[in-house]
Amino acid sequence: MKPLVEISIAHYESLLKYASETSPLYLRLKNAVKTEANTIAILCDLDQAQMLHAVAKHFCPAAVPQIEKAIRLNEFPNSLPPDLLQLINSTRGKS
């Protein structure tokens, strides 16, 4: 399974600005798709997602949480978001 990173257009443009045109990351960013939700979806392998994460840490820190989420979901595809897990646990035993 490949991580699907979804970021805002502003974050995408910022990352694209700092990616070297000769890097695989640049090509991956250029092949991204604009979604109906007005975000950018980037399908990449885990190494590329980690590279994107490293670039974002330096040049677009606001994009880091979305990239980390995509990596985490790739590593644990059956895991639930913490807020949903907390909600489920808080309602157990209540009838």
Image: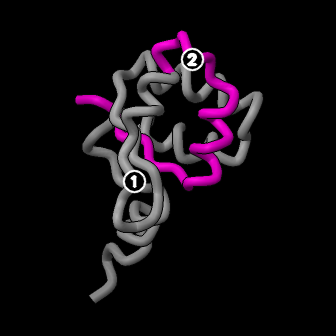
Q: Is residue 80 above or below residue 75?
A: below
Residue 35, image x and y in percent? 36, 58
In the rendered structure, which segment of residues is drawn in magenta?
1-25
The circle drawn on residue 21 is: 2
Q: Residue 14 versus residue 56: which sits nearer the camera?
A: 14
Q: Residue at x 55, y 27 (%)?
A: 52
Q: Who comes first in sequence, dot 1 or dot 2?
A: 2
Secondary structure found at label 2: loop
Within 10 Å of disc 2 (Cα), the crowding (few <14, some 14-19, many 20+) is few
Residue found at x 45% / y 64%: 38
Q: Secondary structure at mark 1?
A: strand
Q: Quadrant of the C terminus?
A: bottom left
Quadrant for residue 37, please give it.
bottom left
- Up/down of 25 relative to 57, above or below: above
Q: Position of residue 24 (x, y in %)?
A: 46, 14
Q: Which residue is mark 1?
A: 34
Q: Residue furthest front?
A: 21
Furthest toward the bottom, the residue is: 95
| Residue nearest the viewer, comparing 22 with 44 | 22
Q: Is residue 40 magenta?
A: no
Q: How is the image coloured?
A: one colour
Kind of residue sitting beneath label 2: Glu
